[in-house]
Amino acid sequence: MRSILPLLSLSTLANALYFYIEGTQPKCFFEELPKDTLVVGHYTAEEWDDNLRAWAKHDGINIYISVDEIFDNEHRVVSQRGGTTGKFTFTAADAGDHKICFTPSSTSGKNNWMSLSAPNGGIRLTLDMAIGETSAIESSDKEKLNDLATRVKDLNARLNDIRREQVFQREREAEFRDQSESTNSRVVRWMLIQLTVLGVTCAWQLSHLRSFFIKQKLT
């Protein structure tokens, strides 16, 4: 089955759609792309879950993705295998038709998963593709990077504020420690002076009492 995606010129466009794939038969799309056009695709593959009664992702699903240049004897530019979700990118080397194919496989063990004729059989693939000029998508990426850079600068500014606060707190702690050590030193000196005065006073009193007793004895 030949499915044609919308023809795109120079404008960037995102195509979001979903479709069903039967068995291990590849599902292919043909897209005519201008030269130097960047294509970024995100996909999600889902299988019917009888317990959930809904389409759901399953670890056993694998998707093989291939992109061929029809104008260049079907030269393959993308050949990759992914899980239930994934991403692929490529840039059109020359203008012309490109064939984008998805081939599923599953190890979930579900009966008749390959047949679309069976109730809720097959694989449902949701595809979101951004197609446009390389410079346009790179410009979008650059805006995101600039936003991230701004956030990083804000975080760095906050970290610098935190560091300055920590330095200020350490300086205050050092000042308080110096004041405490100075106060303790003065207290020790004052205690030594008091002990010295007390010792001198005691010595003077003992000397005075001795003289007094000697005088009493003589009389």
Image: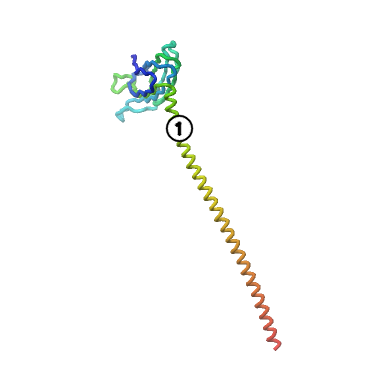
* Residue at 49% across, 45% down: 162
53 vs 15, nearest the viewer: 15
195 vs 115, left or right, is: right
Residue 70 lies in what quarter of the image?
top left
Quick one: which residue is furthest to the top in this view? 73
Q: Position of residue 125 (x, y in %)?
A: 35, 23
Does any portion of residue 78 appear in the rendered image?
no
- The image quadrant of residue 100 is top left
In the image, residue 155 lies at what x, y percent? 47, 39
Q: Quadrant of residue 124?
A: top left
Instruction: Name the residue at 66% across, 78% down.
Output: 206
Left-right relation of 205 to 152: right
Relative to the observer, which residue lies in front, 113 or 45? 45
Q: Considering only vertical position in the picture, is 34 above or below 211?
A: above
Q: Quadrant of the N terminus?
A: top left
- Numbered-mark total: 1
Residue located at (56% from left, 55% from top): 177
Q: Nearer the viewer, residue 18 or 201?
A: 201
Q: Which residue is mark 1?
A: 146
Q: Quadrant of the C terminus?
A: bottom right
